[in-house]
Image (tube, rainbow, N blue to C red):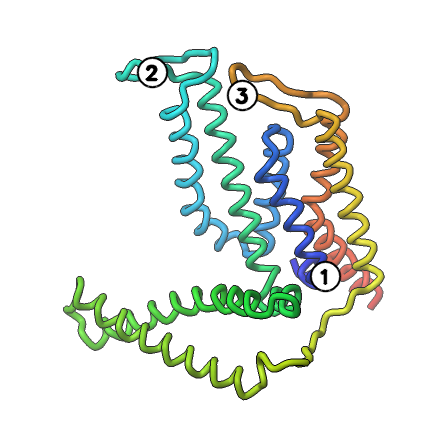
Amino acid sequence: MQGFSRRHPLINFIFFVLVLAGAMIAEHPAIVLTGLFFSVAAAIMLIGAETFARRLLFVLPLMFVTALINPLVSHSGQTVLFSFPSGNACTMESILYGVFAGVRLGTVLFWFFCWNAVITSDKFVYLFGRRFAALALTVSMALRFVPQFLKRFREVSDAQSCLHPGEKGLRHAGRVFSAVIQWALENALHTADAMKARGYGLPHRTSFSVYRFTAEDTACLLFMLLLGAGTLAGALAGGFDWSFYPQISGAGTAVTAGATACFGLLAALPLISEAKEVLQWRLSRSKT
């Protein structure tokens, strides 16, 4: 999804704030299912189907556990399906609430997969480095350090397995952990020396940026804000009113449909950008 990734960092950031807010706050099935569909589509295009399938093995159990916990702890609802050995009722409303809670959790995680692929460390520092320099640097280094740490851990583990083929268990883990920690500390010292040599933290220090807010970025920003305002207006007008307890009830009006369409177009923005890039590429190829 290079088209959307090439947008200005502010555009990327506002987009993820809007779609994550919709995924975490809205309870209406129309918004929940719309967000799930476009988050999955965007994640597959960003990180690839193979990587997405591997991460899905981690997300699906979380979604299942979330859906399972709610009927075990919540016994509200009018439609009783059966009773647990403890005597508590298992209701259809509590099951459906748990299912949708699991779907919302999965949607948030899928959007964060996209976030990690689009909001790189340099974009994060660009957005927050001037006002919150220490915080932006810390978060950026932490996001970069975790995958590096895991990669180095695997490399050292493979090397130790070659040096000590029969060694397993705590002894092997201790060797690997000790080597990786030494590498992490040494890398931290080199990073600190490099930052000091480049004058990080000095007053009146300027910063270089390759990002420019273009006319296309302005149009994209206005488009996002318009769609976000349409979604918010629909929510304030009661288009997303929904309740699972004591019985399932909610809105299903023209306002709901219009606001859902606005949110769907907003969530589809990365896919639209990619489709635009593909179309432009094919048109340029056809002219040559």
**Local crowd at mark 3 within 10 Å, few (<14), some, or many (≥20)?**
some
Q: Which residue is mark 2?
A: 88
* Contact check, label 2 and label 3, Cβ < 8 Å: no
Disc 3 marks a residue whose amino acid type is Phe
* Front in this rendered view, residue 157 or 253: 253
Residue drawn at point x = 51 percent, y = 35 percent: 103
Q: Which residue is mark 1?
A: 7
* Front in this rendered view, residue 171 or 158: 171
**Closer to the camera: disc 2 or disc 1?**
2
Q: Position of residue 170 (x, y in %)?
A: 17, 63
Local SS, label 2: loop
**Local crowd at mark 2 within 10 Å, few (<14), some, or many (≥20)?**
some
Please tell me in which quadrant of the rendered image residue 156 appears. Answer: bottom left
**What's the distance in space between the residues labelled 1 and 3, CA to CA?**
39 Å
**What's the distance in space between the residues labelled 2 and 3, CA to CA?**
18 Å
Disc 2 marks a residue whose amino acid type is Asn
- Relative to 146, does residue 223 appear above or below in the rendering? above
- Give the mark, 2 or 3, whose residue is nearer the N terminus: 2
Q: Position of residue 121 (x, y in %)?
A: 57, 67
Q: Which residue is mark 3?
A: 244
Disc 1 marks a residue whose amino acid type is Arg
* Contact check, label 2 and label 1, Cβ < 8 Å: no
**Closer to the camera: disc 1 or disc 3?**
3
- Give the mark, 1 or 3, whose residue is nearer the N terminus: 1
Seen in the image, is 140 located left or right of residue 279? left
- Relative to 47, does residue 263 appear above or below in the rendering? above
